[in-house]
Image (cartoon, grey):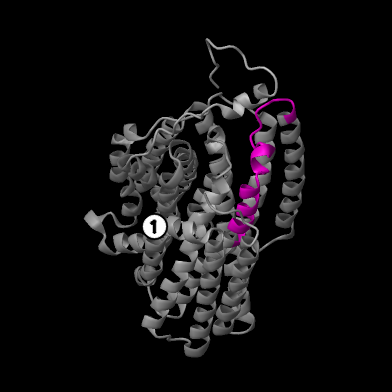
Amino acid sequence: MTKNRGTTPAQGPTARQTPAARAAPAAPGLGGVALVVVLTGYALSIVDAFIVNVALTTIGKDLHGGPAALELVVSGYGLTYALGLVMGGRLGDAFGRRRLYAYGLAAFTLTSALCGVAPTIGFLVVARLLQGLAAAMLVPQVLATIQAATEGQARARAISLYGATAGLAAVAGQILGGLLVSLDIAGLGWRSVFAINVPIGLAALLAVRRVPATKADRRPGFDPLGTVLFGVAMVCVLVVVVEGRELGWPLWLWSLLVVAAVAAVALVRVERALEDRGGSPLLAPTVLSHSGMRMGLAAMVPFSIGFGSFMFVYALIAQGRFGLGGLASGGVLSPFAAAFFVVALFTPRIAAALGRRIVSLGALVQGAGLLLMALVIGVSWPHPPLPLVLAVLAFTGVGQALIGPTLFRMILADVPPAKAGMGSGVLVTSQQMATALGATVGGTLYLSLAHALSEPSAAVLVLVLLAGFSATIFVISLKLPDPR
């Protein structure tokens, strides 16, 4: 905060208005090249969560990895990624978001190379754990930089592109992984799904100086107790969510949720006490108490659960019963990704006309798309007309595009620029946790119902349940603030 010099201090009632009346520093702006650079790192982090899926069989044969090790190749990345996001955002606030983004991108590029040259399955698992930590360092800086460096319509457009990148990268990872393994470029086989990150990461690093340097005005202090409690809660929940299906849901696994609940309650009390004393909590209660963030996260959680569940169950259905391989099943999602990307670009204009009703509209469209897909599967199983499937997927993508980017803007709207890293870390962590939960619960429910009933009945019931999540988002949307 700057101090006024050379003026007489204001007296009386006007003195109280002085801090609020001071003009905030103008946002430095985020040029086109800079936006591409930060979105590139974000896209790589999402692509790598999906790209490895279609290469697991080849990896297992080449490195002699069993099912448990292959599961860690996938889930290990997600575990360390989700665990480090809040701390990554906090470090960006303290030491500079461009600096942390550059360090994270360099580490991500290096660990991708290590994954690509892994001589053993154990080496690959460790490299994937480190790759997740690198992603956790760079990803929170993306939204935080957008929040701190832009304002008004420029911010709305940037966040819309952020949301569009998320949807496009998720599908691109599945398609790109299948394509690279199929082409077997230079005889690299599965190693190419990691090696491709290296030239892209290096190119982004060369242009990282174009990104504006932002950070908190005052470096926040360290919160060791809050960090430990948050870590305990996150690890316990992540182990249940990510490993539950693979481990067969043993009783001891459920006890971790009790540990997580106790750690979460203790975390809330510790953070409140620390903030009341003027300290710097890892998760400031005042930031989390903003209505936009609170209600936005309430809608983001069911949205992300539905997305994770839909993507996982669709992959099971497409590859298991539609007779499509990894590349073809990913390619069928292209209309979904294209519709999501295009509509997301126009969400600022739509939101300007509809206000918070844009989320309500998106929930209705998404729910209708899921019910239509249930109808198509129920009527024409196991060989539904492909053009009709493509059309319904595109329609569903439109609904998701209306919801996702708008919620990003709402959640971060009231977060001060000085705490943009913290806010983005909380947002992305919630999104990642909910997406992983959706994949786990949706997949488990589908497989259980398919065994008890039949595969078409299971698919229809899961899709109807996901439409219920859309109804939940619609109800919450009626109380959301207008997007800014």
Q: Who's the residue at 46% across and 62% down the image? A: 401
- In depth, the one of 344 and 335 nearer the eye is 344
The residue at which mark 1 appears reads as: 345
Which secondary structure, mark 1? helix
Residue 31 is situated, as x and y percent measured from the top left of the image, at: 33, 40
Q: How many numbered callouts?
A: 1
Seen at 56% across and 57% down, the residue is: 436
x, y (%) of residue 109?
36, 41
Residue 51 is at least partly visible in this image: no
**x 55%, y 82%: residue:** 455
Q: Is residue 416 left or right of residue 117?
A: right
Which of the two residues, 275 or 17, is positioned nearer the viewer here?
17
Q: Name the quadrant of the N terminus.
A: top right
Q: Position of residue 285 (x, y in %)?
A: 69, 38
Residue 83 on the magenta segment: no
- Regarding residue 360, the answer to whether it shows in the image is yes
Q: Is residue 104 above or below residue 95?
A: below
Q: Look at label 1 and name its amino acid.
A: Leu
311 or 349, which is in the foreground?
A: 349
Image spot of residue 411 (x, y percent): 57, 49
Q: Give the main secondary structure of the magenta stretch.
A: helix
Is 99 left or right of 229, judged from the image as shown?
left
Q: Residue furthest bottom?
A: 379
The 10 Å Cα crowd at callout 1, few under 14, some 14 to 19, many 20 or more, is: many
Which residue is drawn at the image coordinates 41% and 56% (left, top)?
164
Residue at the left extreme of this rendering = 186
Please state the extent of the stretch shown in magenta in the rendering.
276-302
Q: Is residue 281 magenta?
A: yes
